[in-house]
Image: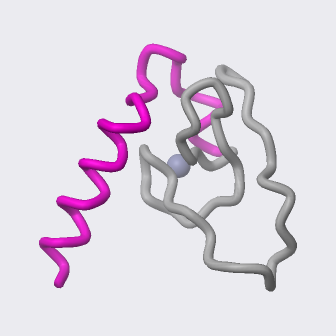
Amino acid sequence: MAIKVTHDGTSPHDRCAERCFNCRAPTRYWYARKDVAVCLECAAVVRPSDVPSKSEWCAKEAALTARVV
Ligand SMILES: [Zn+2]
């Protein structure tokens, strides 16, 4: 894969998964270097420079969530 991701260690019943920064699919995998959620499919194709910072990602998620509500 293009970037290395790590599983968050939770079981499927533990809690809601976070959303992948790229496609927004629920995922339990994280790009640990930036602490951003990314699914395995996107991890295979994105480059490290494609991954937003934690603050950028949180701001984007907050904006998207606000638009839905
Ligand atoms: Zn994805």
- Residue 36, compared with residue 58, is above or below; it is above
Start and end of the magenta stretch? 41-69
- Residue 50 in the image: state x and y as whole percent: 42, 22
Q: Residue furthest front?
A: 55
| In this picture, residue 43 sits left or right of residue 61 | right
- Residue 41, compared with residue 32, is above or below; it is below
**Which quadrant of the structure image shows residue 49?**
top left
| In this picture, residue 46 sits left or right of residue 67 | right
- Residue 46 in the image: state x and y as whole percent: 52, 26
> Does the magenta portion include 27?
no
Identify the residue at horizontal 63%, vertical 44% (top origin): 41
- Residue 68 in the image: state x and y as whole percent: 19, 79
Q: State the predominant SS element of the stretch in magenta.
A: helix
- Residue 10 in the image: state x and y as whole percent: 83, 66
Identify the residue at horizontal 73%, vertical 35% (top origin): 5
| In this picture, residue 48 sits left or right of residue 4 | left
- Residue 65, compared with residue 53, is above or below; it is below
Identify the residue at horizontal 70%, vertical 58% (top origin): 28
52 and 26: which is toward the camera: 52
Image quarter (top left, top right, bottom left or bottom right) of the C terminus: bottom left
